[in-house]
Image (tube, rainbow, N blue to C red):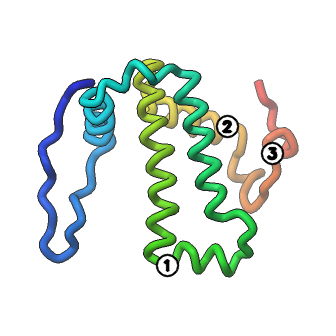
Amino acid sequence: MSGARSSSRPTSKRSRRPRSLSFDELVRQVLAFRDERDWRQFHSPKDLAISISLEAAELLERFQWKNPAEVAALVADPQGNRQVSWEMADILILLVSLADVLGTDLVKAAQEKLEENKRRYPVERARGSARKYRDLGVDDR
């Protein structure tokens, strides 16, 4: 998978937006980008985890000290929304890179975690509640 190159994507003349990629296509593009630059050598699990944390902090910074109306205005503004989207994209790109280094199937891991969360947060106890599963009376075995 690493080293695979993606062809350029056609765009609609109206929107000029590339078509949506599948997750597998995105992974191939992320890894190709990394490999074309010979950056794999710098992608240790520790450094990628640190970078994910730093990018998450940059995402948080976009919202810091803003009240709900200011947050709504930020995400309604095309430029503000783009800045937030790009911070999220940075996190996703780094997460894909970390998953590759660790040999983790992110889709499988997310599916497994969702199943665990369904067990920890049954609808009848968790609906409309922000409480942690421990406070919902769910056995965590």
Residue located at (63% from left, 34% from top)? 116
Amino acid identity at mark 3: Lys
Disc 1 designates what residue? 77
Mark on residue 132? 3
Residues at marks 3 and 1 touching, judged by CB atoms closer than 8 Å: no
Q: Marks 3 and 2, how far apart in space? A: 13 Å
Where disc 1 sits, the SS reads loop
94 to 103, vertically: above or below: below
- Give the percent coordinates (x, y) of residue 98: 47, 28
Q: Earlier in the sequence, mark 1 or mark 2?
A: 1
Q: Is residue 27 left or right of residue 122?
A: left
Q: Earlier in the sequence, mark 3 or mark 1?
A: 1
Classify mark 2: residues with Cα within 10 Å, few (<14), some (14-19) or many (20+): some
Q: Marks 1 and 2, how far apart in space? A: 38 Å
Q: Quadrant of residue 3?
A: top left
Disc 2 designates what residue? 119
Classify mark 1: residues with Cα within 10 Å, few (<14), some (14-19) or many (20+): few
Residue located at (54% from left, 31% from top)? 112
